Amino acid sequence: MSGAQVTGGPHPGLPQQAGPPIEQRGTTTVPARVVARIAEQAALEAPHVGSSAGGLLGVGARRDFHTRPDADCDIYGQVAILRLDVGLTFPTAMASAAQRLRDHVRSRVEDLTGLEVGRIDVEISWLDPSSTARGALR
């Protein structure tokens, strides 16, 4: 699906205005690509998460902790299904890092869009050993 419709009522902090009843007011459509961008930004906010950047067909790509990871989104009614492609610093506990990432992205997407996040698939496509990790592995 390409987007979700969110029905809007009065905002809790704003004064109420006279107008048609809520049932007769319009809807806001949130495109899936916008939800994916929000998920990308939320993933960038998580610690130790990076993205692949640049390159053509994987040639010349670099690992980057300053750009948003890739995300895809499908929307079914009011439920968003997300897929993230990320890199992580190494060493890290991948299972707990992926769960922290899911929790953060879910919270941010749900808060900013009003959609429910049904599932978040996380693909860890690369690991980036820090200079301290390399010394410890020797």
Image (cartoon, rainbow, N blue to C red):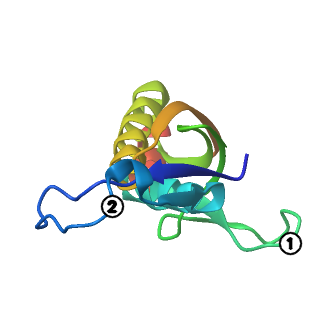
> Which residue is label 2 attached to?
20
Residue drawn at x 52%, y 69% is 67
**Amino acid of disc 2:** Pro
The answer to whether mark 1 and mark 2 are in CB contact below 8 A is no
Mark 1 or mark 2, which has the lower sequence index? 2
Residue drawn at x 43%, y 54% is 24
- Provide the secondary structure element on which disc 2 rests: loop
Residue 44: % across, % down? 44, 59
Calculate the distance from the C-alpha at mark 1 to the C-alpha at mark 2. 52 Å
Give the quadrant of residue 25: bottom left
Residue 48: % across, % down? 41, 50
Left or right: residue 70 compared with residue 93: right
Give the quadrant of residue 54: bottom right
Residue drawn at x 39%, y 44% is 110
**Amino acid of disc 1:** Leu
Left or right: residue 16 compared with residue 55: left
Asked if 104 appears above or below 62 in the picture, the reply is above
> Which residue is label 1 attached to?
56
- Provide the secondary structure element on which disc 1 rests: loop
Residue drawn at x 85%, y 68% is 59
Residue 96: % across, % down? 40, 27
Q: Residues within 10 Å of mark 2 (few under 14, many from 20)?
A: few
Q: Of tags 1 and 2, which is closer to the observer?
A: 2
Q: Quadrant of the N terminus?
A: top right
Question: Count the marks: how many?
Answer: 2
